[in-house]
Amino acid sequence: MSSFNYTIAIDAMGGENSPDKVIQGISLFLKEDKEVFFNIFGKETLIIKEISQYKNILPQNYKIINCESQIEDKDSVRDAIKVGKNSSMWKAIESVKNKESHLVISSGNTGALLVISKLLIKMMDGIDKPAIAGLWPNFKGVSVVMDLGANIEFNEKNYVEFSKIGAELYRSIFDKKNPTVALLNVGSEEIKGHEELKNAFNNLSNGKNNFNFDGYIEGNHIKDGDVDVIITDGFSGNIALKTAEGTVNFITSEIKKIFSNSFFGKVCYLLSFPLFKKVKQSLDPRKYNGGIFLGLNAPVIKSHGSADGLAFFYSIKLSAKILRGGLVKRIKSNFENE
Amino acid sequence: MSSFNYTIAIDAMGGENSPDKVIQGISLFLKEDKEVFFNIFGKETLIIKEISQYKNILPQNYKIINCESQIEDKDSVRDAIKVGKNSSMWKAIESVKNKESHLVISSGNTGALLVISKLLIKMMDGIDKPAIAGLWPNFKGVSVVMDLGANIEFNEKNYVEFSKIGAELYRSIFDKKNPTVALLNVGSEEIKGHEELKNAFNNLSNGKNNFNFDGYIEGNHIKDGDVDVIITDGFSGNIALKTAEGTVNFITSEIKKIFSNSFFGKVCYLLSFPLFKKVKQSLDPRKYNGGIFLGLNAPVIKSHGSADGLAFFYSIKLSAKILRGGLVKRIKSNFENE
């Protein structure tokens, strides 16, 4: 590895507008943090051309590893594994396996990223399945919600494992000693949860946890910010995330429609522009960009495919926090003690 | 039954501010629709006192059935069944069983309402489980989403059954001949859905349906309005609904906070007041008040516990639509033909 404290492998080719947005994100990051070195995987000519536009990306900040091929969003995972060995994604993940990088970020195909990461970086001893964690804004700050879609089938052990992993993630990002963890469940007492969830609840209620177990939480209380880490199966988690995204889009579109429907509305909007800008900033999903794959021997960060340069910057920033917080070591210590 | 076309049994005692909001809802309804007769169950003295405040509720519009006891939200379903036989909820449901009413509305304890309805009104022949359906606003109008929490465990047959039932509900409320139905699922192709869901997908793709089966839909596309009926298991459905509620609340609170944080903001808000009022009206959850229990031999409507008079009015309006649309007969015809 380089003489820098942290080295991040970047798959520069995944998602929309790559590698431009990726390089823009690196430039934004280097303006505020100089402790990270980047191994950049992708088409060298395109990457060099884009880097030349940013004066603050210096030769000592990065190394380009030319990869002529790339995995496309439409590729099946099977194809990606079969023919993707020279792709930017594969090579980036491989550099983590070979200890040339500490962490990998990609905007590419989620399924391929998950499966190739599992194949090369491998699961930590004692952890059954990887999980995808995400940041979720709330009234008091940000929570971690997981699993957001890696695992459709879930058992008691997964809930308990993921509670521990999620607590360590929160601890490493936000430096809070004793984060609060709860299990996502449905409302009415009588119809509450399925067996696996109830068993996990009992297990966590009676167990000696290094976090504060707060029982069940309902979907309408995620926003309250009283719980730091919300654990759910990948099916419900993905549906919660996507439904929340859709709802934000629905409301903001309704507001835009109403304010642009009349001359009076347009005047009001212009006058209130600084306030609407603040609202937009406060709700900006780019600040929470980055699905964190957990349970592997190194962190893997999935940037949203449609992310722009600013959003990619936030996923690099999150990655640096995770590395500084010593996440992998923290998680490992939980499972070695068992 | 009365000489009116439709008779609705009202549990006047459930939820907050009852029976006041219930009577207010009836008054609002009678202003625009005179074809419905109400059997009102609850504390007679309180109901009479409240009715006296509304000049448009005439003696021929209703009958009060005095019930001294009521089921509380905090009561367990077991207790409700054991000691609730003289409660307003029980008696209201019983009046449907005895064919004195066509439909029952309650703001009370959801679990008790579901179980007592199942006990007294019974499931239709050929249908395994009841489902809770709800109205969900979208860019083009309103969709139906179900199950919102009645069934945690779900199998292939439930998905298929509920697709048929949901289509009939949509047809009876919105008078659309060939509604579009889709199954709620998660994003990535590779990790798509569990076995039951995949089997239901195959079954519906190959089956002869009296609706337009549109495959899978993700949570972020519910709002698009391209699908009329969205079918999911009760666990995911409840989480989607609650998460959407929480997200609406989060966004509107952020907007309020930003506009009330400065003098300038307050001025902008005052100026834009008619527009914000429109936004509020467009997003008003009261318009979509009413969980519809389906699969029973008569429709049962659960009004939100915290609903006010206007919200209760909307659930009566929905009930009248369901009765006029001949929902129960429609659903029955699907299962008799099998």
Image (tube, coloured by chain):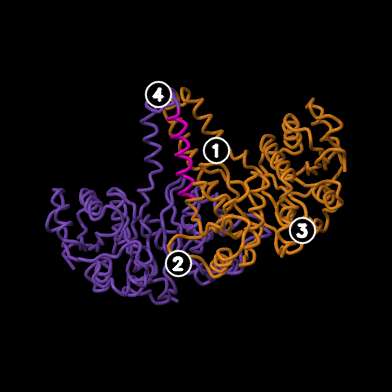
Chain colours: A purple, B orange
Give the amino acid type for the residue marked by disc 3 in the picture: Lys
Residue B169 placed where, x, y %? 67, 50
Do labels 2 and 3 touch, CB within 8 Å?
no
Q: Are marks 4 and 1 on the same chain?
A: no
Which chain does the residue under circle 2 lie in?
Answer: B
The magenta span reads A244-261
* Image disc number at residue B118: 3
Q: CA distance from mark 2 to mark 3?
A: 36 Å
The majority secondary structure of the magenta stretch comes to helix
Rendered image: mark on residue A267 = 4
Viewport quadrant of the C terminus of chain A:
bottom left
- Asked whether residue B170 appears in the rendered view, the answer is yes
Residue B292 horizontal side relative to residue B275, left or right: right
Up/down of A280 relative to B294, above or below: above
Which numbered disc covers residue B283?
Answer: 1
Q: Earlier in the sequence, mark 3 or mark 1?
A: 3
Horizontal side of B276 relative to B16 (left or right) equals left
